Amino acid sequence: MRKTLQGLGLLVFLIGVSGAIDHLWYQPFFGIVLNSFNRFVVPHAALLQEYALFANLAVAALGGALVLAMEALAPERRR
C-alpha cells in the first residue's frame, strides 16, 4: 500500500510540475495526463485562474509531501 501511495504522490508531483510548465510555456509531453489539473480544473475555478502557477506548484508540493510521508512511514531495515 505504501508503494502505491508513493507512486500516486509521484504522479501528483509530476502533474503539478507539468502544469506549472504548461502555464508558463506550452508543454506537449503527455498533455492529457500530466496537464490535466492545469487544463481541466484551473479554468473552472475563478480563484485558481488568478493564481494558476501557485496552484500548480501547490499540487506539486502536495505530491512531494505524500511521497516523503510514505517514505517516513517505511519500516526500518535491519542489517
Image (tube, rainbow, N blue to C red):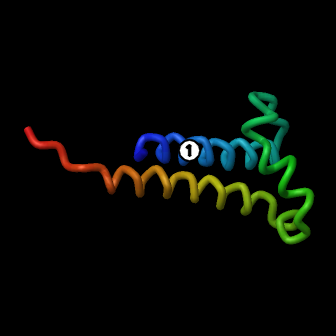
Q: In which quarter of the image is residue 18?
A: top right
Q: Quadrant of residue 41?
A: bottom right
> SS class of the residue under badge 1?
helix
Q: Nearer the viewer, residue 41 or 56?
A: 41
Q: Which residue is drawn at 63% across and 42% down?
A: 14
What residue did someone put label 1 on? Answer: 8
Q: Residues within 10 Å of mark 1 (few under 14, many from 20)?
A: some
Q: Which residue is drawn at 75% across and 28% down?
A: 29
Point out residue 50 in the picture as x, y percentages from the top left corner. Answer: 87, 67
Q: Which residue is drawn at 72% across and 62% down?
A: 54
Residue 28 higher or lower than 62, as above or below: above
Quadrant that contains the N terminus: top left
Q: Which of 3 and 39 is in front in this view?
A: 3
Q: In this view, does 14 lie to the left or right of 42?
A: left
Q: Residue most toward the front?
A: 1
Q: Residue most toward the bottom?
A: 47
Q: Which residue is drawn at 8% across and 38% down?
A: 79
